[in-house]
Image: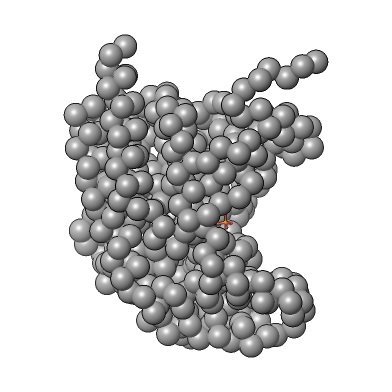
């Protein structure tokens, strides 16, 4: 049977084949274009702010591998460091100097972190941090917030954001009731909801985990004082405060959201960004808590590939560039301010609203303020899908879901931003004509 010719013929053929061998044809659900429809683009290469698909079509990329490509894709220094590390071998399953350099770098850059342990993904980082918190406090319950995503770890797949929110199944099947019953959910930006959980579960809460800027239900900012109040409440209740900075860490600034808002968590989780695009995660924080981890303490956590030398080379190089060139954050944050403020002007004339902080932002298809999961859910996802398709057609690659963030990189230019604004404007003009 002859394939219908389209402009993304190869992606279409690959997607057909992939569906026979990989569930849904993808290795992570949000890649499947499930909520926007159409064929996911199979990518082949990326450089700077641009990504090229299997059919040779190039897009302006606002996903940036879901955050880590903060310098842009295929940065020459990061690439050179990886190639050099490869020369020495891919994996040793033994300690290396690179791990010491990485750990020291993170501890020097983030004041709340005295010790850090490398893992291989954000999910692992969160899972391990929760175990450490439970081991340290000798308590079982954890408080999370509706719409925050912390990876696909059983106990946290409760009222989760990101792909599970997009798919409309925030509580995953396959999670035994017992596993999730120690997970309590609070409302983002509603400190009273946290207070109530603490009161109803006196002396049982080990930790509160939060995305200090929620970036998995679109982008939702913490209201003034919210994180500070959370800090005080955790201290008063002898619970640990865990900031999941998988998205915000080393993106909002060198000390992440905790530096931006001036609130010190007990533990922090990081993900992909500290691997510069390689599969990496880490958790770290107070020395007395981190000393609970094996082999020093009794909380077991391990990983054959943890601290992999190639991944460390990429991550160290990216972090050092970010540390040594503060103008990078200045640039991406001011580019973000210009872009999202101009997008907001267009949005509000068309019944939409933009939330943003620095280089992270989201255009919500609702004219109401978005401050939590319930208000994010009011967005018109069918209208988002039309917007997504039009932008993709124009060569702008956005996350294929209303409930994901846009990411800018140091490689995005003012011209890129102007082009994207023109495309957005043209979507709304065209929409209004019909
Ligand atoms: N925490 C947050 C805040 C995330 O955004 C993500 C994924 N984007 C994770 C945890 C899980 O990370 P990973 O996909 O690397 O397991």
Toward which corner of the image does residue 26 lie, by quadrant?
Answer: top right
Q: Is residue 327 above or below residue 51?
A: below
Q: Is residue 262 above or below residue 161?
A: below
213 sits to left or right of 226? right
Is residue 190 visible to us here? no
Residue 248 image position (x, y, % from top left): 40, 61
Toward which corner of the image does residue 100 lie, by quadrant?
Answer: bottom right
Toward which corner of the image does residue 226 lie, by quadrant?
Answer: bottom left
Is residue 419 visible to us here? yes
| Image quadrant occupied by the C terminus | top left
343 sits to left or right of 172? left
102 sits to left or right of 268? right
Q: Say which of 1 and 138 sits in front.
A: 1
Q: Is residue 399 above or below residue 73?
A: above
Q: Say which of 65 and 304 sits in front.
A: 65
Residue 178 image position (x, y, % from top left): 62, 51
Residue at image location 74% in from the left, 77% down from the top? 87
| Image quadrant occupied by the N terminus | top right
Q: Is residue 98 above or below residue 267?
A: below
Residue 257 image position (x, y, % from top left): 34, 65
Residue 349 image position (x, y, % from top left): 19, 29
Q: Say which of 32 and 296 sits in front.
A: 32
Residue at image location 20% in from the left, 58% down from the top? 224
Residue at image location 60% in from the left, 55% down from the top? 153
421 sits to left or right of 238? left
């Amino acid at each position: 049977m002859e394939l219908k010719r389209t402009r993304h013929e190869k992606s279409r053929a690959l997607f057909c084949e992939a569906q026979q061998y990989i569930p849904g044809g993808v290795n992570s659900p949000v890649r499947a274009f499930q909520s926007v429809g159409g064929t996911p683009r199979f990518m082949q290469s990326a450089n700077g702010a641009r990504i090229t698909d299997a059919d040779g079509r190039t897009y302006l990329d606002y996903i940036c591998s879901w955050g880590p490509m903060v310098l842009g894709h295929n940065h020459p220094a990061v690439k050179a460091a990886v190639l050099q590390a490869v020369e020495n071998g891919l994996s040793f399953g033994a300690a290396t100097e690179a791990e010491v350099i990485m750990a020291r770098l993170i501890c020097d850059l983030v004041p709340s972190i005295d010790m850090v342990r490398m893992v291989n993904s954000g999910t692992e980082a969160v899972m391990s941090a929760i175990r450490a918190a439970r081991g340290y406090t000798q308590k079982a319950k954890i408080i999370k917030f509706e719409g925050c995503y912390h990876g696909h770890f059983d106990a946290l797949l409760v009222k989760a954001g990101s792909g599970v929110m997009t798919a409309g199944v925030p509580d995953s099947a396959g999670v035994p009731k017992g596993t999730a019953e120690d997970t309590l959910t609070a409302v983002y930006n509603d400190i009273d909801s946290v207070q109530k959980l603490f009161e109803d579960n006196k002396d049982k809460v080990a930790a509160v985990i939060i995305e200090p800027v929620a970036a998995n239900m679109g982008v939702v900012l913490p209201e003034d004082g919210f994180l500070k109040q959370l800090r005080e409440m955790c201290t008063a209740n002898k619970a640990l405060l865990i900031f999941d900075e998988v998205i915000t860490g080393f993106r909002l600034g060198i000390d992440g959201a905790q530096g931006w808002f001036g609130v010190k968590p007990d533990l922090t989780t990081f993900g992909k960004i500290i691997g510069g695009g390689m599969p990496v995660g880490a958790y770290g924080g107070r020395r007395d808590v981190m000393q609970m981890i094996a082999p020093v303490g009794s909380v077991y956590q391990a990983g054959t590939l943890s601290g992999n030398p190639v991944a460390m080379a990429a991550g160290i190089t990216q972090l050092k560039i970010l540390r040594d060139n503060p103008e990078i954050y200045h640039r991406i944050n001011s580019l973000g301010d210009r872009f999202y403020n101009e997008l907001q002007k267009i949005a509000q004339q068309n019944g939409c609203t933009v939330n943003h902080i620095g280089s992270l932002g989201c255009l919500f298809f609702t004219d109401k303020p978005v401050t939590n999961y319930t208000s994010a859910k009011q967005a018109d996802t069918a209208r988002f899908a039309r917007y997504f398709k039009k932008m993709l057609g124009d060569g702008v690659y956005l996350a294929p879901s209303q409930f994901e963030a846009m990411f800018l990189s140091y490689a995005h230019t003012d011209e890129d931003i102007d082009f994207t604004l023109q495309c957005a404007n043209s979507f709304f003009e065209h929409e209004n004509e019909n």
